[in-house]
């Protein structure tokens, strides 16, 4: 998943090219199992709504939270298990450039193998970002 440059009333900025009907791996982030930050984004309310279940983390009756497994499988059939170690709901609309940069810090490289999932919230809008992070706890080779 790449990005493009947009010009608006505040000047130039980058926008991610979020994939429809799928979650997209950010091209400048680590690959599963590697040291570094694997960053994946997906829509919560359009384009297949693949991250709708992620967007409601922390709400009453949602059975997904701290300590739960997030499993990625690569094209070779290897499975990478990350355990949720944090989640945030961050104001994105009407936030200063400094605030947006602080929100974007979740996408920065990391020294430890980490997974960062990003979507929007609430389900009827996109005023906030939901960020869920996890640390790598297991790698299962293909065929096991």
Image (cartoon, helix red, strand yellow):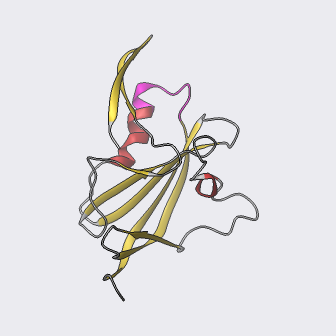
In-front residue for pair 19/115: 19
What residue do we see at 52% from left, 74% from top?
67
Left or right placement of residue 50 versus residue 25 in this view = right
Q: Name the residue at 29% across, 70% down.
A: 33
Which residues are drawn in magenta?
92-99
Q: Is 98 colored magenta in this rendering?
A: yes
Q: Quadrant of the N terminus?
A: top left
| Residue 109 percent coordinates (x, y) | 26, 52
Q: Residue furthest bottom?
A: 144
Q: Which of 23 and 97 is in front in this view?
A: 23
Observer-nearest residue: 141 or 15?
141
Magenta segment: does it hold 119? no
Give the quarter of the image for residue 36.
Answer: bottom left
- Tell me where residue 25 appears, x and y as whole percent: 36, 52
Say which quadrant the C terminus sits in: bottom left
Image vertical order of residue 100 relative to residue 72, above or below: above
Residue 117 locus on image (x, y percent): 46, 55
Number of numbered discs present? 0
Above or below residue 80? Residue 43 is above
Residue 129 in picture, x, y percent from top left? 54, 42
Is the magenta region chiefly helix, strand or loop? loop
Q: Which residue is drawn at 34% across and 48% down?
A: 26
The answer to whether 20 appears left or right of 28 in the picture is right
Taking the view exactly as shown, the residue that stands out farthest to the right is 61
Residue 98 figure quarter: top left
């Amino acid at each position: 998943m790449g990005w493009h440059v947009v010009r608006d009333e505040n000047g130039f900025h980058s926008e991610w090219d979020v994939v429809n009907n799928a979650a997209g791996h950010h091209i400048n982030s680590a690959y599963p199992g590697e040291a570094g930050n694997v960053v994946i984004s997906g829509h919560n309310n359009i384009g297949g709504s693949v991250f709708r279940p992620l967007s409601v983390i922390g709400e009453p009756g949602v059975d997904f939270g701290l300590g739960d497994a997030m499993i990625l499988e690569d094209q070779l059939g290897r499975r990478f298990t990350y355990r949720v170690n944090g989640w945030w709901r961050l104001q994105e609309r009407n936030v200063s450039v400094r605030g947006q940069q602080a929100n974007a810090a979740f996408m920065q490289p990391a020294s430890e193998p980490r997974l960062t999932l990003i979507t929007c919230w609430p389900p009827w809008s996109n005023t906030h970002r939901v960020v869920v992070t996890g640390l790598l706890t297991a790698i299962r080779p293909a065929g096991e």
